[in-house]
Image (cartoon, rainbow, N blue to C red):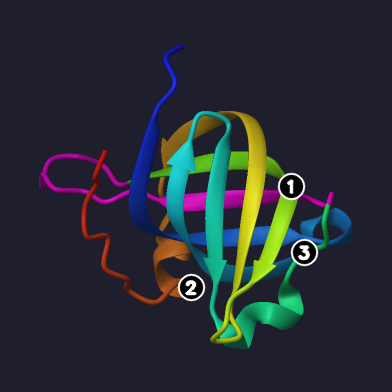
Amino acid sequence: MRPFSAKVELPCRVFCGPDATLEFSGLVVKIDTGRLVLALPEGQTRACPDLGESVRLELLLPVKARSAAAKCLNVRARVAHTTEMPDGSWQLVLNFRRASFRDRSENILRKLPKAAASGWTM
C-alpha cells in the first residue's frame, strides 16, 4: 500500500456513543493513509465524540456516470485529536486501519443534505 493524501469535501454520517446510537452528519475534508479529518459545523458540536472514542463513518462518494451505482465508504475509526476552530466549529482527526466500499442505500440519501462534492485534489 502506497501512502496518499487527498483534500476532499465528502458528506458523511457519523455513528458514536453506546451501541452507535448517536447519529449526526459532518464533512470529511482530508483523507490520508489511515487517517481522515472530519469537520463538524457549529450546530453539531454537542454531538462531538470524545478523544479516544470509537466511531463509525459512512462517507458518501460522488457518482459521475449514470450507469454507476452509488457507493459509500464505511470506516471504523478512533478519535485521535480534536480542535475547536475560531468560528465555533470543530475538526476531528480520526485514525482508521481499513475501509470498505458498499452500495449506498436510499436511507443515506434522505437523511443527509445535498452537499457539494467538489472533486478531488491530490
Residue under pointer 3:
49
Prevalent SS, magenta region: loop
- Magenta residues span 52-70
Residue type at mark 2?
A: Lys
Query: Residue 20 vs residue 97: left or right?
Result: right
Query: Which one is closest to the eye, mark 3 or mark 1?
Result: 1
Residue under pointer 1:
80
Outermost residue on the front side: it is 86
Query: Which one is closest to the eye, mark 1 or mark 2?
Result: 1
Q: Position of residue 94 (x, y in %)?
A: 65, 47
Q: Nearer the viewer, residue 43 or 37?
A: 37
First-in-chain label (3 vs 2): 3
Which residue: 42% across, 72% down?
110
Q: Secondary structure at mark 3?
A: loop
Which residue: 54% across, 45% down?
36
Q: Quadrant of residue 88?
A: bottom right
Q: Position of residue 27 (x, y in %)?
A: 47, 64
Outermost residue on the left side: it is 66
Which residue: 24% across, 46% down?
120
Estimate the spatial distance between the alpha carbons at disc 3 and disc 2, rounded to whole Å: 20 Å
Q: Is residue 69 magenta?
A: yes
Residue under pointer 2:
111
